Amino acid sequence: MPVVIYGAELSAPVRAVLLTAKAIGLEIQFKQVDLLGGTETKSEAFKKINPAHSVPAMDDNGLHIWESRAIMGYLVHQYGKDDKLYPKNPKERAPVDNMLHFDLGALYQSFASYFYPKVFFNKEYDPEMELRVKDRLEILDTILSTNVYAAGSKMSIADLSIVCSLSVLPTFKYSLDPYPNVKKYVAKVKSELPFYDKVAKKGLEEFEAMVNPKKN
C-alpha cells in the first residue's frame, strides 16, 4: 500500500509535504480533502486518522502523522535514498529542526495570525500582527545574510517548508523587496527544484482564487 496523504493543495503545509515526496521520488496516494467545507475533516472517519482534524495528514499502513514537518522528516528517513534533506546525524539535523520549528512557531504562524483572520472571518488587518510578520521576515533575512539555505550550506526540508510558507505572500501583494536575502533565497530554492511549479501551481491558484475571487 502506498503512503496516503490527505490534504488540500491550497494549503502551504500540504504543498510542503508534496514537494518532499517529489524530491525523494516517492509515489504517494493523494486524497483530496474539502478543507473549506469544514465537515469532512471533522468526520469520525477522518478523526481516526487525525484527531486534530487538520491537513495534511498521513496514513502509512496504519501509522498516522498529522503535522506537515513531522511527515516530511518521516518520509525522508523512511523512503529517501539518502538523508541529505534531513540528516540522521544529530549535529547536522539540529539546525534543520531549528529552522523547521522557527517556521512553524514564528514565521508561518505570523502569516496565519495576520492574513488569515481577514480571509476567513473578514476581519480588518491587525497592525500589531503585521509587526510580527516584519520581525520574522527580518530574522529570516538576517539568517540568510550568512546562510546559503535556511539551515546552513545544504538544502533541507526546512527550505521546502519555508518556501511554501513564503509562497502565500504574493497572494496578499506583500512584497519581499525590504528583505533582499529572503527574496533571493526564494528564487534560488525554486530554481533548484525543477518540479516546484508542477507541484505547487494548482494549489497556489486555488489559494489565489479563494483570497481574491474574481468579481462578475
Image: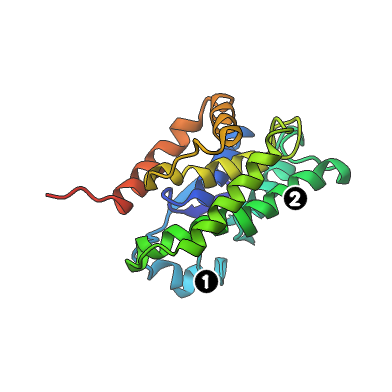
Residue linked to disc 1:
47
Residue linked to disc 2:
98
Front residue (pair 118, 92) = 118
Q: How is the image coloured?
A: rainbow
Q: Where is residue 86 in the image (x, y as percent from the top left)?
A: 74, 41
Q: Residue at x 49, y 35 (%)?
A: 177
Question: Which badge, 1 or 2, is on the more N-terminal residue?
Answer: 1
Q: Position of residue 40 (x, y in %)?
A: 40, 67
Front residue (pair 152, 138) = 138
Q: Where is residue 213 in the image (x, y as percent from the top left)?
A: 24, 51
Tell me which amino acid carries mark 2. Answer: Asn
Q: Which of marks 1 and 2 is in front?
A: 2
Q: Residue at x 49, y 49 (%)?
A: 12
Front residue (pair 204, 178) = 178
> Regarding mark 2 in the picture, which secondary structure is present there?
helix
Q: In this view, does 127 lie above or below 72?
A: below
